Image: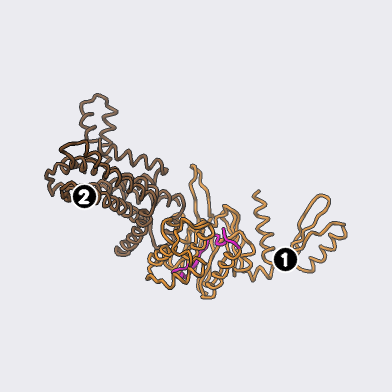
Amino acid sequence: MKANGMFKQTRLLEMIMFRELIRDKIFISLSGAAVVLVAASLILNEMVVGQEIKATKDLGLSVLNVFSLFILIFLGVNQVSRDLTNKSLYFLFSRPISRAHYLLGSWFSILAAVAAGILVMSAVIFLLSFLQQEVWLGGIIAAGFLTMLEMMVLSAFALFFVLIASPQLAMFLTLLTYVIGHTIEKAAVIIEQSANLPLKYLITVLDAVLPNLEFFNKKPEIVYGLPISADFFLHATLYAFAYALLVLLVSMRVLAKKEL
Amino acid sequence: MENVIEVNGLCKVYKKNFRKIHALKGIGFTVRKNMILGILGPNGAGKTTLLKLLTGIMAPERGMGTLALLGTEDIATVKHRIGFLPENPEFFRNISAYELLVFAQRVSGIQHDREKIYRVLRQVRLFDERRERVRNFSKGMRQRIGIAQAIIHEPELLILDEPMSGLDPPGRRMVTDIIEDYAKLGRTILFSTHDLDDIEALCTDVMVLKEGEILLEKSLAQLRLGSRFLIQAENREGKFSQVAKDTEELWRMLENIRNKGMRIIKVQSGIADHLELFYGQETDDES
């Protein structure tokens, strides 16, 4: 299929799947819960004298990251596994839509839903910081962007897990990848001194295979307003795209072989 | 006449629990333009597998058989000319019937045409529910939106997997009308069913599948010519059936049954009965 045809079909799929995701009750509930939680920082501020805005930023960015992960897991994984088990793919694959289109469309739609969630949460964080006499836009944009890059990698892994495992296991594996991805760097340093060889090998393998998601975590710098170089953003973007692309290519191969 | 489908030595093997299941065992047939082919067969006969292969949802075994649709072996390139209704269709749940049809139009490479969508929605009696989300649809309504999405781009070849499933009598009538109207436009239709009356009422041709093989492939005209009579009778040992090839043999058999003091339960004729005899015997073998 021609490149523009490929792009068009993927775009159509992404649009309809995005609509499907953001109308889901889970998305509305998660976004609502995230907004409430961010707003709760106002109560927290009462307890932190002198550093009110820091509490808002800290809690806001944590909620932004965790709820993006929840949207990805509870919506994205759920949607694709439902498509696979309900056989709604028959409707799609009997049309000029390839399995690669479907996978890319799903990936983009999940990212679009995560982006929508980030946008809502960012707006609330901005509003709260504004209410506390600080226009904190640059930090929110940087945090939102880095969270998107992280979710870009993680959603590619989530799609891969959905194809090879049951929905529940895929959710668990995605969560595990998130946890390992945020701790593996420290674990690798700690384990360097250890005499436990099997554990050392395991950590080394996990470190090599799984993405280092902590790489995208610049929360301290963002909260304290420290500068982050443009090189870092470029590096992070390339890292995220390369990792996601690699995992998506493997997933495409798995889906192509999958008996429907 | 132009062949719309050409199938030669088509095989499909599934792997299930390390076991190979031969869903289709090298079948071959052709479908001509404007044909309405009914595919009949018990569960597990290979009907759905065949339809999934024809629509490109799955690929046949490599190097085992050929499959050509609308003049090409590359099914992917002609998918916009095919309309497909899967068995128990499932779609996106949080979008409306109207949005689903817009997507179906655009993804098939045609421009969004609201009037056309409204016309099809009226045809499948879902116009009033056009803004309703698909998740709220009953099984019958899902079947009807499934038919709508299959015909919205006016395909040359319409493939329906058990289109009457889950429909009430007016719904069945609606599907019958759509198939008849479609055939009048010179289009080709393939559908699988368990209902012999549907075959007799709608089809020009019939194919009976069992365990991945074609047991019967005939036009209904041929079947009409060779239509037999089925006599069901009862003696002390129980019920039994006999088949008469023609009216002469029928009268002779009936007289014979009466002379032996047995009770005649019924005499059936017609294509559906002929197929029932064929199909019934084959399915009985299974049990």
Amino acid bearing label 2 = Phe
Which chain does the numbered disc 1 sit on?
B
Q: Which residue is mark 2?
A: A126
- Taking the image as shown, residue A144 lies to the left or right of residue A74, namely left
Residue B152, quarter of the rendered image: bottom left
Please give the name of the residue rendered at 55% of the width and 55% of the height, measured from the top-left corner: B46
Q: Which residues are magenta?
A: B151-168
Q: Position of residue B205 (x, y in %)?
A: 59, 68
Residue A36 bears which disc, if any?
A: none
Check disc 1 and report the residue beneath it.
Answer: B269
Q: For this rendering, which residue is in front, B156 or A39?
A: A39
Mark 1 crowd level (few <14, some 14–19, many ≥20, 10 Å Cα): some
- Mark 2 crowdedness (10 Å alpha carbons): few <14, some 14-19, many ≥20: many
SS class, disc 1:
loop
Have a look at marks 1 and 2 and say if they share a chain.
Answer: no
Chain seen in orange: B
Chain in brown in the render? A
Query: Are the residues tagged 1 and 2 within 8 Å (C-beta)?
Result: no
